[in-house]
Amino acid sequence: MRIEAATEPGSTGRPNEDFVSFALPASGLGGVMVVLDGVTPHPDGTGCEHGVPWYVAGLGGALLELSTSARNMTLRECLAAAIERTARRHAERCDLSHKYTPQATVVAVRWDDETVEHLVLSDSVLLVEDVTGQVTAVVDDRLDRLPEPVGTLRAAVRALPRGSAERAAAAAEWGRAVEALRNAEGGFFTAAADPAVAERAVTGARPRASVRALAGLTDGATRLVDVFARADWPGAMAVLRKAGPRELIERVRREEAADPEGARFPRGKRSDDATAGLVEF
């Protein structure tokens, strides 16, 4: 078995808000991969004195431990318990009812000799390559299906001159429209302080014998496919297996550097935290 990971902050001077970790129990009953992408703090604050990296480390560690040790629990149950455990750690000192309380996207995969289980919440992606070489992207696509006026507002932003006051105002309006749909019916969901959000996750399972490789990617790493269109999902998996997660991230960074202002490839951040985890059986 090959296990490999790489992670890199989007810019110097800011902490990396991603998380990736693996567990291979001594019992030999398989393993677990967890990949999280912390949501960048909102300008209005989060109501939390600890910060997003602290939250992501706590949630990721709890989810990894529960998914490994509590084999009788589903991944949804493990995520719910991890959210609850992390919330208890700072409930007395922080306002967990704050709309922008620290939160994260989630990819979790657990396998044994018989089954590979997965869970995906929000816009991180799980790639699964089967033994025939076919690659499937497991996604939670609710961010791509947000109701109007989100799409119209986004198009309006991109039509305005870069650096203009009009574009900045339109971008702020678009951002407010998106945030109004965070963890709301008809919108999209991230792991914050409410364990019930685990029921919103995309889950599934497949026979272990049918799987050749798995990869968990935060949206900073998926840019090679869904922003810059330099590869498709099978192509991204090929890079991961042949050259490793570090090479995938370096290819993203080269594309970002070639279009620093987002003129050709519009994106919310010039460069984002990027993380990739790979498991080959």
Image (cartoon, helix red, strand yellow):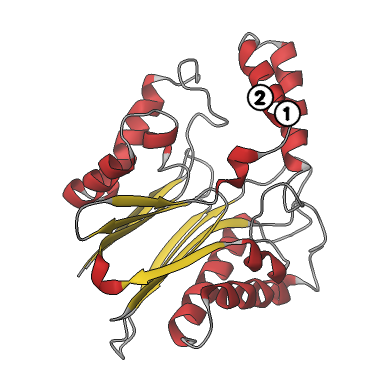
Residues 43 and 13: in front is: 43
Q: Residue at x 66, y 54 (%)?
A: 189
Could you give the CA–CA distance between mark 2 and mark 1, rounded to whole angstroms? 6 Å
- The residue identified by callout 2 is 154
Q: Which mark is residue 186?
A: none
Residues 9 and 116: in front is: 116
Q: Is residue 226 above or below residue 119?
A: above
Q: Is residue 209 above or below residue 221?
A: below
| Amino acid type of the residue that numbered disc 2 sits on in the rendered structure | Arg
Residue 215's spot in the image, x, y percent?
34, 56
Residue 120's spot in the image, x, y percent?
51, 59
Where the N terminus falls, by quadrant?
bottom left
Quadrant for residue 228, please give it. top left
Assign a secondary structure to mark 1. Answer: helix
- The residue identified by callout 1 is 174
| Amino acid type of the residue that numbered disc 1 sits on in the rendered structure | Trp
> Dot 2 surroundings within 10 Å: few (below 14), some, or many (20 or more)?
some
